[in-house]
Image: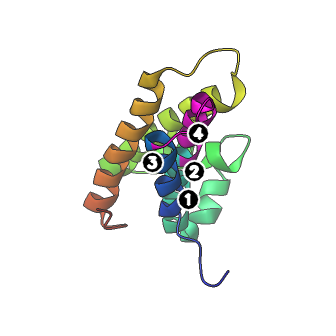
Amino acid sequence: MAGRFDPLIFFDVADHLRSNPLQNKEEACFRTSVGRIYYTAFLLIRNKLVGKSYAISQMPGTGEHEKLINYLKRSSKNVNEFALGALLDSLKTLRRHADYEPQNPLQDTHLESAFSKFQQIKIYLNQIGWYTIA
């Protein structure tokens, strides 16, 4: 495998699993889609903020994901970055439900909400000028 991994490939996988779930394994495919959408957004944002790693590491939180979200929501004076943090946090909640609550069925609304939130994230990323994502 050559070159740097493009996180948008995770989104392609999520979209494929939503559109073409394995027969009798639809819920697993949809849960996986939610996770891949979250990681697409997380990696795109983290990769763009790599130069701010010290500031992010100083944020309250127990892990890299929480610290990054807190950085976006608390230290940024940019409204778009705050919105990115809120959306990423919301996606993280959906991913946790998909990954850690198998006793609770994943509703179609969870899956569609994850896709919708990622579309909003793309808009903010484009507005900030971090990425141009179609």
| Residue placed under numbered mark 3 in the picture | 15
Look at label 1 and name its amino acid: Leu
Residue 48: x and y in percent read: 48, 67
- How would you rate the neighbour count of disc 4 (Cα within 10 Å): few for under 14, some for 14-19, many for 20 or more? few
In the structure shown, which secondary structural element does the residue marked by tag 4 occupy?
Answer: loop
In terms of image quadrants, where is residue 25? top right
Q: Nearer the viewer, mark 1 or mark 4?
A: 4
- The quarter of the image holding the N terminus is bottom right
Residue 39 is tagged as 2
Q: Give the magenta part as a residue range.
A: 20-36
- How would you rate the neighbour count of disc 3 (Cα within 10 Å): few for under 14, some for 14-19, many for 20 or more? some
Residue 109: x and y in percent read: 42, 23
Mark 4 and mark 3: Cα distance apart in space: 13 Å
Residue 52: x and y in percent read: 56, 65
Q: Is residue 8 magenta?
A: no
Q: Decide: is 105 above or below 98.
A: above
Q: Is residue 26 magenta?
A: yes
| Residue placed under numbered mark 4 in the picture | 22
Residue 16 is tagged as none
Main secondary-structure element of the magenta-colored stretch: helix
As drawn, is 80 to the left or to the right of 42?
Answer: left
Name the residue located 64 percent from the left edge and 63 percent from the top edge: 54
Look at label 2 and name its amino acid: Tyr
Mark 1 and mark 2: Cα distance apart in space: 6 Å
Look at label 3 and name its amino acid: Asp
Name the residue located 62 percent from the left edge and 64 percent from the top edge: 53
Mark 1 and mark 3: Cα distance apart in space: 17 Å
Mark 2 and mark 3: Cα distance apart in space: 13 Å
| Residue placed under numbered mark 1 in the picture | 43
